[in-house]
Amino acid sequence: MIQNKYVTEYIKLWKIGKIELNKERILLIAYLEKYILPRDDLYFDETMLENFIKFAERWYFPLEPFQKFFSAFAFLFHKEDDANFYEQFLLLMGRGAGKNGLISALAHFFISPLHGIPKYNVSIVANNEKQAKTSFKEVYDTIGSKEVLEDMFYRTKVEIMGYDTKSVLQFHTSNAGTKDGLRDGCVIYDEIHSYATFDTVNVFSSGLGKVRNSREFFIGSDGYVRDGFLDKTIQRAMDILEGKELDDPLFPFICRIDNVEEMHDPDKWGKANPMFEYEMSAYAKQLLRKVKTQYRQLKTNPSSRMEFITKRMNFPEVDLEKSVATWEEIEATNRPMPDLQHRACIGGLDYGRIKDFAAVGLLFYIDGNYVWKTHSFARKGFLDSVELQAPIRDWEDAGLITIVDGPVIEIKHIVNWFVEMREIYGFNRVVADTFRLDLVKAALESEGFEILYIRNPRAIHSLLAPRVETAFAKHNIIFGDNPLMRWYTNNVLVKTKADGNKEYLKKDEYKRKTDGFQAFIHALWQADELLEDDQDFYLDDLVF
């Protein structure tokens, strides 16, 4: 059995009702009490932890109970070889909870003689230079304001070095190509909500392992990039907290409200921002007044609701006035594909912008579910010129998309896919809009397909919107494990016109593609052909 007074005190605060925790932190305590604290092959380095706390409180600020609790696990080691037990740390909290302040103190401590590991270099990484420099500048300014620290650390605008250990602190943007090749002991990734892929982490983590007791810290609040690095890391964290992955060296500290209704109760805000827990500091009281002011302004400025709940409450929410479905509903499309053999289906095609993306697919209706089997094509020249927030190459490796070289996406790629699918499923009808109709019609009809074309695609959006919303809400749509299709769907902007009709547009014209979703909608227009007789959704008598 191992103990640390800061860990014990924080757990006690919750058990006696002094603080209220969100479900992820409750799971964390249960996980620690069941799997970690009973072990006798580990130990907290009390001396190093106390040195860090004294260092932080002397040069930075008094640490809150949750910060001491979190920090204790950065100094948990194996007895056998004195190697650190946790190699990675997830610190996910609402805006204003002091993530960067704590990281500044830790980064500074790691390059100090109190830590004592020679050349324990620290890199701080973020998407842009301003954010990457946040903690670096705090350390820089702290050294400049204290003469005793100036004698211990060398500082410039681009790096800080501890004279004793020759350890260097630097900042980097997340562009993987800009890394200078430090033999890092620690990498801190800031604003992880904006990482669409693992590329940045893969590059910077590759320099670890050459210095003992390497660590990685992933910090931030939630954001708007879905199915990216953050979502996958949260799922990884939940597998740990639920006891499914006990060998994973990640320590997950996640603070967020448990449901959207808690945003209306300031007494629950401590779940997202632990600064509001227990006995609040002067900083916390001032911050709480600011957050309350922002909450009151939601009545007159409802457009700021998403920012408030996502950033302050650390709870991702989709604006259903502008999005097709919640992210949870989109995630629910990730279910195994049923047996599609000997099932009726219809093809859907979106071939509008032949210089960037195109999408094809087959729509089935099985046991009350719309099942969409799809593939996409993207032009290499477009991908090289536009930086999409999407792991396109990963999706190519998974067989979800084909990247083609040339000035346009040739129609032959579309035709060949439908011909190949027809050999398997025996369908004959393909739905497309009238854009580039002559090209599409001639090419597909020459292969014997029947083309159903939509004269006014946006008109069918309004007709299908209730069906689409209901199908997502009831989890009646199956895409299989298709992150590309989830990306397409999450990129759709629902525009409600003055007459109340809805249109499916793009949230970003160039970087957030929707081709696969539009192909799905085209096929859905003829879905009544696949429904059972007792269904009441018939559109074939409507003229477009």
Image (cartoon, grey):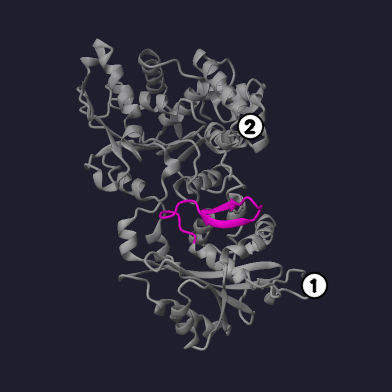
* Residue 186 in view here: no
Q: Nearer the viewer, residue 13 or 526?
A: 526
Density class for disc 2 (Cα within 10 Å; few <14, some 14-19, many ≥20) is: some
Q: Which is nearer the N-term, disc 1 or disc 2?
A: 2
Residue at x 22%, y 15% (from the top left corner): 150
Secondary structure under badge 2?
A: helix
For the residue marked with disc 2, what is the amino acid?
Answer: Met
Q: Is residue 161 above or below residue 181?
A: above
Report the residue marked by disc 2. Answer: 263
Residue 219, horizontal then vertical, whole percent = 43, 35
What is the x, y in percent for residue 521?
58, 66
Label number found at residue 408 = none
**At which x and y percent is residue 101?**
41, 24
Image side of residue 438 versus residue 261, left or right: left
Q: Which of the 4 image quadrants contains residue 211?
A: top left
Q: Nearer the viewer, residue 413 or 431?
A: 431
Q: Is residue 150 magenta?
A: no
- Marks 1 and 2, how far apart in space? 42 Å
Residue type at mark 1 is Asp
Q: Residue 525: in sight, yes or no?
A: yes
Q: Nearer the viewer, residue 310 or 439?
A: 439
194 sits to left or right of 366: left
In the image, the segment drawn in magenta is: 491-514
The spot of residue 479 in percent (x, y) is: 57, 64
Q: Nearer the viewer, mark 1 or mark 2?
A: 1
For numbered disc 1, what is the local secondary structure? loop
| Numbered circle sitting on residue 534 | 1
Q: Look at the image and say whether residue 509 sits in the magenta stretch.
A: yes
